[in-house]
Image (cartoon, rainbow, N blue to C red):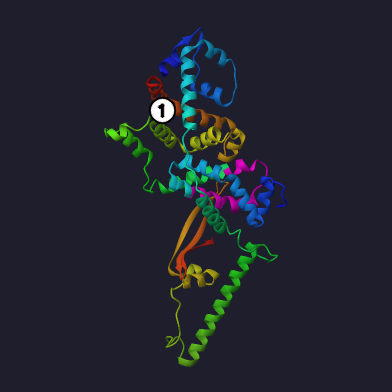
Amino acid sequence: MSEKQTGEKHTSEKHLSDEQLAQLIYDCEDNGERDHLQTCRSCRKRYGELSAALDSARRLPVPELSAQERARMFEAAWQASELNQPERSSGLAWPILRHAVSFCAGLACGAALLLAIVSQSGAHGFLSAPQGEITRPKNPIPAMLSGTPAAKIYSELEDPVILIQESKEEDDSIQHRRVIEGTTENGAIQIVWNL
Amino acid sequence: MHNGRISTDDELAAAASGRDERAARQLYDRYADRVFRIVYRVVLDESLAKDAAQESWIKIFRSLKRRRPTGSFAAWISIISVRTAIDLARKRARSSGAMTVEEMEAHLASDDPSARQQSAEREIEAKVMRVLDALPENQKAAFILRHFENMPLREIGRALGCSEGTVKAHIYRAATAVRRRLAKFLGVEMKKS
């Protein structure tokens, strides 16, 4: 077919290329191609094949979503979109506030730790091991989370793991997100913690 | 917004981005079928298409605030859907256990008499699925958005980050691939009938 397309001529005109045939279908552009189709049996055949093939592609059946499936999908997407959460009422821009909160939390944790060490050293001598009723968090908190609000969440999860995920945004940029995954008493949970 | 007047897509989108669930649901009802249709044609697997549709809607709802209503809402969600489906298909690499296009084709081409008794229509479907599946991602996206959704070339170009000329080239190449793959088969079918 391709040899014929490039080599064979009809009434001093070259056969239409595949691109020209597709152009006739999609763009309705006509620079004399339709006249050529009238007189060239080979191109007419290829044009017919193209139309038939594209029609058959269009008839490819698509399964239908049940009403239940549709409703479930909406609920899941709406919940996950976080648009169902009440809006943050602070007048400050959230990115600024988030850093401020992280900083304050870190400061508070540091102060609490210092206080605990000082009080322990007063009772049992400096750096002595904690005794008896002091409860430890379920999971040792990784350094990267230390002093962040995520640390508390991390310590309360069963089998928590931290993953770095790449997500492609609409503008093609790649965003890295730090994700904490773990299980609460109520079931599986995934927490996204932006880098 | 809900006083009986039919709201536009942009009005509903603005309301939904302000956490109005009813508006979001209305928007969803308008476009749920379209989104599912698009993602199914990309992934060609019902189970995966459901995941892709849900993921698309999460992205749509999350992106509502950032959306600038310069183009049509329908085009915007079509673009998100097709890209989400392509991403998901790439990640999952058909781990769902459903019959893949290759398996379906092999099944139809086998010596099993029951397979040979499959209707011609099923065979054409398998061929169409095979050829769509084999298209490069951008070709597939451009072809689906143009051929099935009739999206303007300019919108497709904006979605794929390329010129109208490149979009045309993608579509023409995809169309040619479809013809080459199916022409002989369709010819046989025409002779049969």
Q: As displayed, is residue A173 above or below residue B150?
A: below
Q: Quadrant of residue B118?
A: top left
Is residue A16 rendered to the left or right of residue B67? left
Q: Is residue B53 visible?
A: yes
Q: Residue at x 59, y 17 (%)?
A: A31
Disc 1 marks a residue whose amino acid type is Arg
Q: Nearer the viewer, residue B49 or B67?
A: B49
Quadrant in the picture for the C terminus of chain A:
bottom right
Closer to us: A8 or A61: A61
Q: Position of residue A176 (x, y in %)?
A: 51, 55
Against A34, residue A27 (above or below) is below
Range drawn in magenta: B51-77
Magenta span main SS: helix
Residue at image location 68% in from the left, 51% down from the top: B14
Q: Would you name the residue on which mark 1 appears?
A: B181
- Quadrant of the image containing the N terminus of chain A: top left
Residue B176 lies left or right of residue A87; in this view the side is left
Q: Quadrant of residue A83?
A: bottom right
Tell me the subunit letter for badge 1. B
Q: Nearer the viewer, residue A96 or A160?
A: A160
The residue tagged with tag 1: helix, strand or loop?
helix
